[in-house]
Amino acid sequence: MRLGIVFLPVQNVAAGTPVRRVVETAQRVESFGFAGLWMTDSVGRGPATLDPLIALAAAAAVTERIELGTCVLQVPIRPPVDAAHRIRSLDALAGGRMRLGVGTGSTQADFSLFGADYESRFRALPDALDTMRAVWRGEPVDGVVLAPWSDVPAAPPILLGAWRSQRWIERAARECDGWLASGIHSSWEDLERGIGLYRAAGGTRAAVANVSIDLRETPKVTPLGAHSKITLICTPAEARERLARLASLGFDDVLLIAPPDDPAQLEAIRALV
């Protein structure tokens, strides 16, 4: 089972400038042998945030091997052709290492800021993905073709974020390259049921995203960690047991939110596997 690290692109004054945080985290993630660096996407929920595609471009410049992914990009709040161009740009800069985790979005404030229709998000996501795939294939959109880059894949692998819905989990299996379950919103029972549905529908890659972890004797439980249903805020021994349980369920990846105030903990996290 692979471990990835989730970077929360929110303002942290104590950690230095945003580019320094992104660059140093990306370099540590690669040097410690993690599979990838992933970033979340929020705009209207309080603290200042970075656009994940722009932040991942900075990570691409200082890494060579790791995957660079979103978990998840709120596709319906963005014009699909603009999103397709920016995603293709990042994938070109990263040499084809982009992994596009997508979702419908779940927060009204993010939609309001972008002037997008929150109520239509479940219809908007499939339509937007169809348009984005057409752009990546070099097909005309409104009579205009966005020329593709010839030295990167036609499209990045797409992983669909879904928590409990059978329809969306099966859609991830049939129409996408992977499924992202949620460590925040999914219970152990949700994960067991979901992985069964996903594999039965022919799904391949399955990951549990946004799993908070803190292995210190006195962990700092963040509001996100306290709200999450699946965490590794525990002793290293218990963390190994929980990871083994996820592996036994059949998940290929776990994407971990490491403590932002303790970058050195990445080495201890890598030693779990």
Image: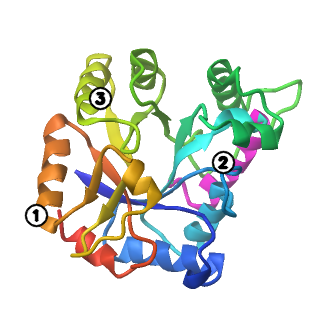
Does residue 67 appear in this view? no
Percent x, y of residue 37: 45, 61
Residue 166 vs 35, above or below: the answer is above
In the image shown, does 203 or 142 lie closer to the viewer?
203
Residue drawn at point x = 56 percent, y = 69 percent: 59
Is 40 displayed left or right of 31 in the figure? right
Read off the residue under disc 1. 237
Is 13 displayed left or right of 141 in the figure? left
On-image quarter of the C terminus: bottom left
Is 215 displayed left or right of 112 in the figure? left
User: Residue 81's image quarter?
Assistant: top right
The answer for how far apart the CA atoms under marks 3 and 1 are is 24 Å
Amino acid type of the residue that numbered disc 2 sits on in the rendered structure: Ile
Read off the residue under disc 2. 87
Residue drawn at point x = 64 percent, y = 77 percent: 19
Percent x, y of residue 54: 68, 61
Instruction: Give the mark nearest the N terminus, 3 or 1.
Output: 3
Read off the residue under disc 3. 190
Instruction: Give the mark nearest the N terminus, 2 or 1.
Output: 2
In the image shown, does 266 or 65 lie closer to the viewer?
266
Residue drawn at point x = 72 percent, y = 49 percent: 86
Mark 3 surroundings within 10 Å by alpha-carbon count, few (fewer than 14), some (14 through 19), many (20 or more): some
